[in-house]
Amino acid sequence: MPAYGFFVEFEARPGREEDVARFLVDAKALVDAEPGTLAWFGFRLGPSSFRIFDAFETEEDRETHLRGKVRQRIEALGDELFTVPPVITPVEVLAAKLPG
């Protein structure tokens, strides 16, 4: 069971909402290459509000992901896409249901 996760909050700049949505869709391919990422969800809460939730079995896997390609893309595109820097909150996963 995953014990560690991140909850990430994004707010898109006006007019860049679809670019943020596309960023999340494209980011999935980067996450697919991370064996330590057990679950990853990119989703939209409203017209300009987006979130990511991801889960990991170990703290090491979570830290590897934090320094990975998605984070690099967030930093590279942040000023262009987001109104403020994304808020990345580490979380403790208490219960989960995953395939397998």
Image (cartoon, helix red, strand yellow):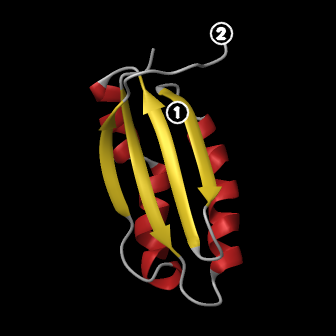
Amino acid carrying label 2: it is Gly
Dot 2: element:
loop
Residue 70, image x, y percentages? 49, 53
Q: In this rendering, is residue 31 above or below 99? A: below
For the residues carrying marks 1 and 2, which lies nearer the camera in this image? 2
> Residue 30: horizontal and vertical position, in percent?
59, 46
Q: Residue at x 60, y 51 (%)?
A: 42
**In this view, 26 is above or below 78:** above
Which residue corresponds to mark 2?
100
The relative height of residue 47 versus residue 38 in the rendered view (above or below) is below
Residue 53: mark in rendering? none
Judging depth in this view, the residue of 6 and 80 nearest the camera is 6
Residue 4 position, x and y percent, is 35, 29
Outermost residue toward the top?
100
Contact, mark 1 vs mark 2 (Cβ under 8 Å): no
Real-space Cα distance between discs 1 and 2?
18 Å
Query: Dot 2, crowdedness within 10 Å: few (<14), some or many (≥20)?
Result: few
- Compare marks 1 and 2 and give the one earlier in the sequence: 1
User: Which residue lies at the image location 59% right of the left edge and 90% below the top edge?
Assistant: 14
Mark 1 residue crowding within 10 angstroms, few (<14) / some (14–19) / many (20+): some
Q: Quadrant of the C terminus?
A: top right
Quarter of the image where one finds residue 76: bottom left
Q: Residue 9, located in which quarter of the rendered image? A: bottom left
* Residue on which disc 1 sits: 34
- Residue 95 rendering spot, x and y as whole percentages: 44, 21
Q: Secondary structure at mark 1?
A: loop
Residue type, label 1:
Glu
Depth order, front residue of 24/70: 24
Residue at 39 percent across and 43 percent down: it is 6
On-image quarter of the N terminus: top left
Identify the residue at image location x=59%, y=35%: 33
